[in-house]
Image (cartoon, rainbow, N blue to C red):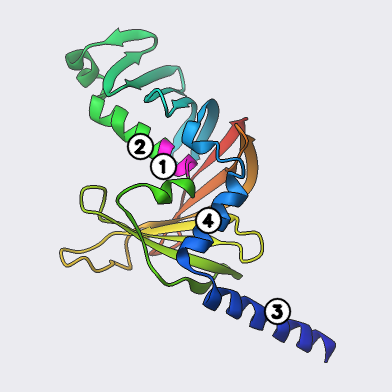
Amino acid sequence: MRSFFVLTLWCFSFLCTAQNISAKQLLNNSITYHDPAGKWEYFNGSFTVEMTTPSAALRRSNITIDLKSEYFNVDAKRDTVITTYTVDKGTCKMAHNGKLLDSLQAKTKNMSCDRATLYKNYYTYLYGLPMKLKDPGANLSETVEKKSFKGKDYLVLKVTYDKAVGSDVWYFYFNPNTYAMEVYQFFKTDENGNEKLDSGEYILLTEEAIVQGIKMPKVRAWYYNKDDKYLGTDTLIKE
């Protein structure tokens, strides 16, 4: 009887939290958890990420981000090949095994400034979450949802983006007690803006690393939504 009472009380408390907290409050609470001193806005630091996938060799990426100086650099090593992408105030530079490349030389290595920008946006977005959800063009749903995912209960924010930013629909799953971000998930959309439920991926976040005072996910494991197929894991190995 006591266990039933405790479980009922916990469920009631969780439901009330989902009903009473606003989307902005949930986001602010999560930012307070991950970036308590507000350091992301001035982030200037480096970290290393190892990416493992079932069908390719390990890739080790050394990443530097200086937001105020509008500087990004990634040196990625796979096997014996090192590719370098730098975006400095909008100016792109590329190198292959230490040799600086022009655009024609880069093309022969399957490198481009578009890819440099892609990497900059990718790493800045994913490691800047949840703070990046306050960027212009990110639109929070007014309603906080209560969802269970992989056997755990979460408070969930739905986020869409202005057309100039992106067409995917994202869901962010937060621990209802600590407000830590533990899962995110995205779906592609059709020509009418409706979610394609057999598209997209979900990402499970485990462990944490402190980088420049910010709690970042240490391990990010990627899966397809449609069949739970495992895609790969990014591991933050250097703080």
Which residue is tagged 3?
10
Label ID, residue 125 = 1
**Residue found at the very far right of the displayed protein:** 2
Going by the numbered disc 1, the residue's amino acid type is Tyr
Q: How dense is the environment of label 1, judged by Cα within 10 Å: few (below 14), some, or many (20 and up)?
A: some
- Mark 1 or 3, nearer chain start: 3
Label ID, residue 28 = 4
- Asked if disc 1 and disc 2 are in contact, CB closer than 8 Å, the reply is yes
Going by the numbered disc 2, the residue's amino acid type is Asn
Label ID, residue 121 = 2
- Mark 4 or 3, nearer chain start: 3
**Residue 51 counted in the magenta span:** no
- Residue drawn at x 61%, y 40% as measured from the top left: 37
**Quadrant of the snapshot with the C terminus:** top right
Q: How dense is the environment of label 4, judged by Cα within 10 Å: few (below 14), some, or many (20 and up)?
A: some
Going by the numbered disc 4, the residue's amino acid type is Asn
Q: Nearer the viewer, mark 4 or mark 3?
A: 4
**Residue 3 placement: quadrant:** bottom right
Using the numbered discs, state the Cα–Cα distance from disc 4 to disc 1 in whole angstroms: 17 Å
